Amino acid sequence: MVGHSLGGAYIRSFAVYYPEILAGLVIIDPADFTQTKENDRLPYLDIGFTQEMIDSLFLKNAIKDSIRKSNNPNYLKRRKTDVLQMMRDSEFEGIRNSELPNIPVHILVGGRYDTPLRLRATEYNDSIYFRAKWKHRVERWTEEILTVDKGMLFYSGDAGHFVHWDNPELVISSIRIVLQDYELMKKGNEE
Protein backbone atom coordinates (compact mmCIF):
# COMPACT_ATOMS: atom_id res chain seq x y z
CA MET A 1 0.00 0.00 0.00
CA VAL A 2 1.10 3.51 -0.75
CA GLY A 3 -0.22 6.44 1.28
CA HIS A 4 0.59 10.15 1.31
CA SER A 5 0.10 12.65 4.13
CA LEU A 6 -2.98 11.64 6.15
CA GLY A 7 -3.12 8.55 3.94
CA GLY A 8 0.21 7.53 5.49
CA ALA A 9 -1.41 7.35 8.90
CA TYR A 10 -4.33 5.42 7.42
CA ILE A 11 -2.19 2.75 5.79
CA ARG A 12 -0.07 2.45 8.93
CA SER A 13 -3.29 1.60 10.78
CA PHE A 14 -4.51 -0.70 8.01
CA ALA A 15 -1.29 -2.75 8.26
CA VAL A 16 -2.05 -3.62 11.87
CA TYR A 17 -5.42 -5.14 11.00
CA TYR A 18 -4.68 -6.74 7.63
CA PRO A 19 -0.96 -7.64 7.50
CA GLU A 20 -1.60 -10.90 5.64
CA ILE A 21 -2.76 -9.10 2.49
CA LEU A 22 0.12 -6.63 2.33
CA ALA A 23 3.50 -6.96 0.64
CA GLY A 24 4.68 -3.76 2.32
CA LEU A 25 4.06 -0.09 2.97
CA VAL A 26 5.35 3.01 1.21
CA ILE A 27 4.45 5.94 3.44
CA ILE A 28 4.99 9.31 1.74
CA ASP A 29 5.55 12.38 3.92
CA PRO A 30 2.97 11.17 6.44
CA ALA A 31 0.86 13.00 8.93
CA ASP A 32 3.05 12.46 11.96
CA PHE A 33 1.46 9.45 13.64
CA THR A 34 4.38 9.37 16.09
CA GLN A 35 3.50 12.81 17.44
CA THR A 36 2.39 13.32 21.02
CA LYS A 37 1.48 16.48 22.89
CA GLU A 38 4.84 16.29 24.64
CA ASN A 39 7.04 15.89 21.58
CA ASP A 40 4.99 18.47 19.64
CA ARG A 41 6.66 21.11 21.80
CA LEU A 42 10.27 19.98 21.27
CA PRO A 43 10.93 21.97 18.06
CA TYR A 44 9.87 25.19 19.81
CA LEU A 45 12.37 24.50 22.57
CA ASP A 46 15.02 23.94 19.88
CA ILE A 47 14.40 27.38 18.40
CA GLY A 48 14.70 29.09 21.77
CA PHE A 49 11.15 29.27 23.10
CA THR A 50 10.58 28.98 26.83
CA GLN A 51 7.80 26.76 28.16
CA GLU A 52 5.74 29.88 28.91
CA MET A 53 6.16 31.13 25.34
CA ILE A 54 5.06 27.75 23.98
CA ASP A 55 1.99 27.67 26.25
CA SER A 56 1.07 31.19 25.15
CA LEU A 57 1.45 30.30 21.46
CA PHE A 58 -0.66 27.16 21.78
CA LEU A 59 -3.39 29.10 23.62
CA LYS A 60 -3.34 31.88 21.02
CA ASN A 61 -3.67 29.33 18.20
CA ALA A 62 -6.55 27.55 19.95
CA ILE A 63 -8.39 30.86 20.35
CA LYS A 64 -7.75 31.79 16.71
CA ASP A 65 -9.07 28.42 15.56
CA SER A 66 -12.18 28.75 17.73
CA ILE A 67 -12.92 32.21 16.32
CA ARG A 68 -12.37 30.99 12.77
CA LYS A 69 -14.89 28.19 13.28
CA SER A 70 -17.51 30.35 15.00
CA ASN A 71 -17.30 33.18 12.44
CA ASN A 72 -17.80 30.89 9.46
CA PRO A 73 -21.28 29.31 9.32
CA ASN A 74 -20.18 27.17 6.35
CA TYR A 75 -17.20 25.76 8.19
CA LEU A 76 -17.06 21.98 7.67
CA LYS A 77 -15.88 20.11 10.73
CA ARG A 78 -14.76 17.20 8.60
CA ARG A 79 -12.10 19.13 6.73
CA LYS A 80 -8.84 17.24 6.42
CA THR A 81 -7.04 19.64 8.76
CA ASP A 82 -9.67 19.17 11.45
CA VAL A 83 -9.58 15.39 11.13
CA LEU A 84 -5.81 15.52 11.42
CA GLN A 85 -6.04 17.76 14.47
CA MET A 86 -8.52 15.40 16.11
CA MET A 87 -6.12 12.54 15.46
CA ARG A 88 -3.23 14.54 16.90
CA ASP A 89 -5.30 15.47 19.93
CA SER A 90 -5.86 11.79 20.60
CA GLU A 91 -2.11 11.47 20.01
CA PHE A 92 -2.55 8.83 17.32
CA GLU A 93 -2.76 6.37 20.22
CA GLY A 94 -4.16 3.50 18.21
CA ILE A 95 -1.34 3.69 15.72
CA ARG A 96 1.50 4.25 18.17
CA ASN A 97 0.34 1.51 20.50
CA SER A 98 0.16 -1.13 17.79
CA GLU A 99 3.12 -3.02 16.46
CA LEU A 100 3.93 -2.95 12.77
CA PRO A 101 3.79 -6.33 11.06
CA ASN A 102 7.17 -7.55 9.87
CA ILE A 103 6.77 -6.49 6.24
CA PRO A 104 8.91 -4.03 4.27
CA VAL A 105 8.10 -0.48 5.37
CA HIS A 106 9.48 2.63 3.70
CA ILE A 107 8.92 6.18 4.84
CA LEU A 108 9.72 8.86 2.25
CA VAL A 109 10.03 12.44 3.42
CA GLY A 110 10.61 15.70 1.63
CA GLY A 111 12.89 18.26 3.18
CA ARG A 112 12.21 21.32 1.04
CA TYR A 113 10.66 24.21 2.94
CA ASP A 114 7.77 25.31 0.76
CA THR A 115 5.15 26.65 3.13
CA PRO A 116 3.13 29.36 1.33
CA LEU A 117 3.79 32.84 2.64
CA ARG A 118 0.20 33.28 3.84
CA LEU A 119 0.51 30.17 6.06
CA ARG A 120 3.86 30.99 7.63
CA ALA A 121 4.13 31.80 11.31
CA THR A 122 4.69 35.42 12.23
CA GLU A 123 5.82 34.84 15.82
CA TYR A 124 9.08 33.11 14.86
CA ASN A 125 11.25 32.15 11.88
CA ASP A 126 9.08 29.50 10.26
CA SER A 127 11.85 27.94 8.16
CA ILE A 128 14.04 27.38 11.24
CA TYR A 129 11.06 25.86 13.06
CA PHE A 130 10.39 23.63 10.02
CA ARG A 131 13.95 22.22 10.22
CA ALA A 132 13.68 21.61 13.97
CA LYS A 133 10.31 19.87 13.52
CA TRP A 134 11.67 17.63 10.76
CA LYS A 135 14.70 16.68 12.82
CA HIS A 136 12.44 15.29 15.55
CA ARG A 137 10.05 13.62 13.12
CA VAL A 138 12.85 11.89 11.25
CA GLU A 139 14.24 10.58 14.56
CA ARG A 140 10.85 9.13 15.49
CA TRP A 141 10.21 7.71 12.01
CA THR A 142 13.63 6.06 12.12
CA GLU A 143 12.61 4.35 15.36
CA GLU A 144 9.41 3.21 13.63
CA ILE A 145 11.16 1.57 10.68
CA LEU A 146 13.73 -0.09 12.93
CA THR A 147 10.92 -2.28 14.27
CA VAL A 148 10.77 -4.27 11.00
CA ASP A 149 13.47 -6.29 9.23
CA LYS A 150 13.16 -4.40 5.94
CA GLY A 151 12.51 -0.83 6.99
CA MET A 152 13.94 2.15 5.12
CA LEU A 153 13.77 5.91 5.46
CA PHE A 154 14.29 8.04 2.35
CA TYR A 155 14.90 11.79 2.62
CA SER A 156 14.64 13.98 -0.47
CA GLY A 157 15.91 17.49 0.08
CA ASP A 158 14.59 18.48 -3.36
CA ALA A 159 11.03 17.44 -2.56
CA GLY A 160 8.38 19.23 -0.58
CA HIS A 161 5.34 17.63 1.03
CA PHE A 162 4.28 16.14 -2.34
CA VAL A 163 7.28 13.86 -2.75
CA HIS A 164 5.43 11.81 -5.38
CA TRP A 165 5.12 14.92 -7.58
CA ASP A 166 8.56 16.35 -6.89
CA ASN A 167 10.49 13.08 -7.02
CA PRO A 168 8.35 10.35 -8.63
CA GLU A 169 11.43 8.23 -9.37
CA LEU A 170 12.05 7.90 -5.64
CA VAL A 171 8.53 6.62 -5.06
CA ILE A 172 8.74 4.16 -7.96
CA SER A 173 12.12 2.89 -6.74
CA SER A 174 10.77 2.49 -3.23
CA ILE A 175 7.82 0.43 -4.46
CA ARG A 176 10.19 -1.80 -6.44
CA ILE A 177 12.44 -2.32 -3.42
CA VAL A 178 9.46 -3.14 -1.18
CA LEU A 179 8.25 -5.77 -3.65
CA GLN A 180 11.74 -7.27 -4.03
CA ASP A 181 12.22 -7.37 -0.26
CA TYR A 182 8.79 -8.93 0.20
CA GLU A 183 9.70 -11.72 -2.21
CA LEU A 184 13.02 -12.29 -0.40
CA MET A 185 11.25 -12.43 2.97
CA LYS A 186 8.64 -14.81 1.58
CA LYS A 187 11.36 -17.12 0.19
CA GLY A 188 13.20 -17.00 3.51
CA ASN A 189 10.04 -18.05 5.36
CA GLU A 190 9.43 -20.93 2.96
CA GLU A 191 12.91 -22.39 3.43
Image (spheres, grey):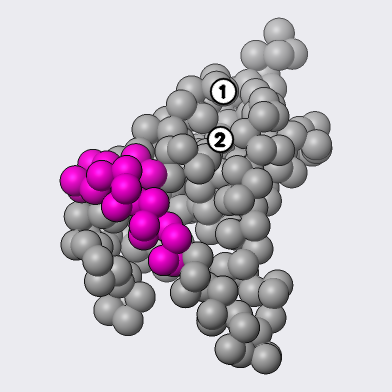
Residue 16 appears in the rendering: yes
Q: CA distance from mark 1 to mark 2?
A: 7 Å
Residue annotated with mark 1:
148
Quadrant, the C terminus: top right
Tag 1 near tag 2, CB within 8 Å: yes
Where is residue 67? Give x, y as percent. Answer: 54, 80
Q: Is residue 150 left or right of residue 137?
A: right
What residue is shown with label 2? 105
160 sits to left or right of 101: left
User: Overall secondary structure of the magenta stretch?
Assistant: helix
Disc 2 is placed on an element classified as: strand
Indicate whether residue 93 is drawn in magenta. no
Q: Which residues are magenta?
A: 41-61
Q: Residue at x 58, y 31 (%)?
A: 104
Check the image and report above or below for 24 versus 11.
Answer: above
Query: In the image, 105: left or right of 86?
Result: left
Amino acid under disc 1: Val
**Does 58 appear in magenta?**
yes
Question: Residue at the location (46% across, 38% down)?
Answer: 38
